[in-house]
Image (spheres, rainbow, N blue to C red):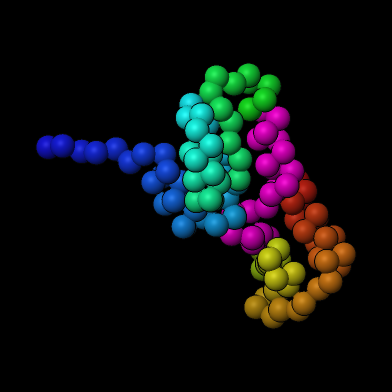
Amino acid sequence: MNITRPDGLEVLQHIRASRNQLPILVLSNGNRPEDRVQALGMGADGRVMEPFAFSELSARVRALLRRGGRSPEGFLRLDDLEPNRVEHTVKRGGRGTDLRPKEFALPEYLMRNAE
């Protein structure tokens, strides 16, 4: 039985299709500009070339998390409270309301730091 392993771009495409908001950082030893452009065009948020220093990888991961520090689907949930980061709405007990960005920031912050 011959099982073929998907290449990195196929994995990237599959993940991006199912998890649109997930930050994706590609590690690659390909040095051609076309390869970099293709990875970014298929949904990668960044790319680190091998060989790389761990400090660079760590810094890029922190930058992605700062920029995209959200749940993959854009939703949080705490009991029956459900803020939606994409639409700036909040539902409680199935009833929703729209909020302005500054109004939305407080419940989002409190939920992310509930502990």
Whole-percent x, y for residue 77 in the image: 65, 61
Residue 62 seen in the current view: yes
Q: Is residue 18 magenta?
A: no
* Outermost front residue: 33
Quadrant in which the N terminus is drawn:
top left
Q: Return the residue nearer the eye: 12 or 75.
A: 12
Which residue is painted at 46% across and 57% down in the image? 17
Which residue is painted at 65% across and 35% down in the image? 61
Q: Return the residue nearer the eye: 42 or 106.
A: 42
Q: Return the residue nearer the eye: 92 or 86.
A: 86
* 106 lies left or right of 51: right
What range is drawn magenta here?
58-78
Which residue is painted at 80% across and 55% down in the image? 110
Q: Is residue 107 above or below residue 16?
A: below
Whole-percent x, y for residue 25 in the image: 57, 39
* 6 lies left or right of 93: left
Whole-percent x, y for residue 68 in the image: 69, 49
Which quadrant would residue 91 be assigned to in this image? bottom right
* Outermost right residue: 102
* Outermost left residue: 1
Numbered-mark total: 0
Q: Is residue 77 magenta?
A: yes
Q: Is residue 9 above or below residue 14?
A: above
Which residue is painted at 68% across and 66% down in the image? 86
Q: Is residue 45 above or below residue 55?
A: below
Q: Return the residue nearer the eye: 13 or 41.
A: 41
Residue 28 seen in the current view: no
Whole-percent x, y for residue 15 in the image: 46, 50
